[in-house]
Amino acid sequence: MPPAGKESSSKLQILATEHWSILATRTLTYNESLSRVNIFLAILSGAVIALALVAQADHFGAAFISIAIPVLSIVLFTGVATIARLTRLNQDDYRWVIAMNRLRHGYLDLHPELEPNFTSSQYDDLRGALLTLGIEAAAGVSVGSVLHLPQTLPGMLTVIVAAVGGAITALVALAFGISAAGVAVAAAAGFVLVLVLMAVSGRGSYTRTPPSLQPRFPTP
């Protein structure tokens, strides 16, 4: 059996190796998230520029409407797929944060005297993960937590995709010859509908916690 000091050193080395591996995986997750957002914004920008050229030639006539609806539908599909992938990547990042908190708990098991030097949490429940992410968990829903959602990549893109959905419904209403007031109502209804559907879908994806992420070291 190895000496206690050597055994402790081996455990620290194993934990540190796993810690760096998770950090590298989180970096790849962030890179893919930014790449997905850039792809969507490039498609959106290209579609807007193309529709602007068509509008100059057709003066927002029937040809413009017949082209704009399928083009914006493609943009809408791309946005929904991008948000779905970003949501999945955020779930993966949450897994890596939990894993790092467990490793941090292992560090402090070996050297509990180092606890005052740690700012991130050593607990692997939701409160500990939020603390590591820099989000202070408070009782109830605070204004800060509500305003945090639109600042995230999925939240920001959800608003943009909802605006695209509103534009599509407005164009459809315009194609049926509805009045200006009706077009405005249709646009607002399309925006709210897409926003609500995306919010419900995103919320449902976070309510299912896999068994591997059940807390082993909950916050006292």
Image (cartoon, grey):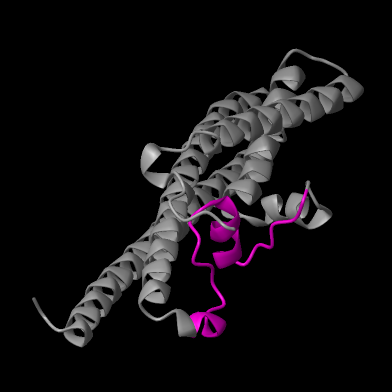
Residue positioned most to the right: 181
125 within the magenta span: yes
113 within the magenta span: no
Is 4 on the left or on the right of 79, as rendered?
Answer: left
Front residue of 44 and 30: 30
**Figure quadrant of the C terminus:** bottom right
Residue 50 location in percent, x, y?
Answer: 55, 44
Q: Residue at x 20, y 82 (%)?
A: 4
**Figure quadrant of the N terminus:** bottom left
Residue 206, quarter of the rendered image:
top right
Residue 161 location in percent, x, y?
Answer: 62, 39
Residue 167, quarter of the rendered image:
top right
Q: Residue at x 57, y 77 (%)?
A: 119
Which residues are the magenta region? 114-139
Residue positioned most to the top: 176
Front residue of 39 and 118: 118
Q: Residue at x 47, y 84 (%)?
A: 114
Q: Is residue 36 among the parts visible in the rendering? A: no
Q: Is residue 69 among the parts visible in the rendering? A: yes
Residue 43 location in percent, x, y?
Answer: 49, 47
Is 75 on the left or on the right of 18, as rendered?
Answer: right
Q: Is residue 219 above or below residue 119?
A: above
Residue 204, quarter of the rendered image:
top right
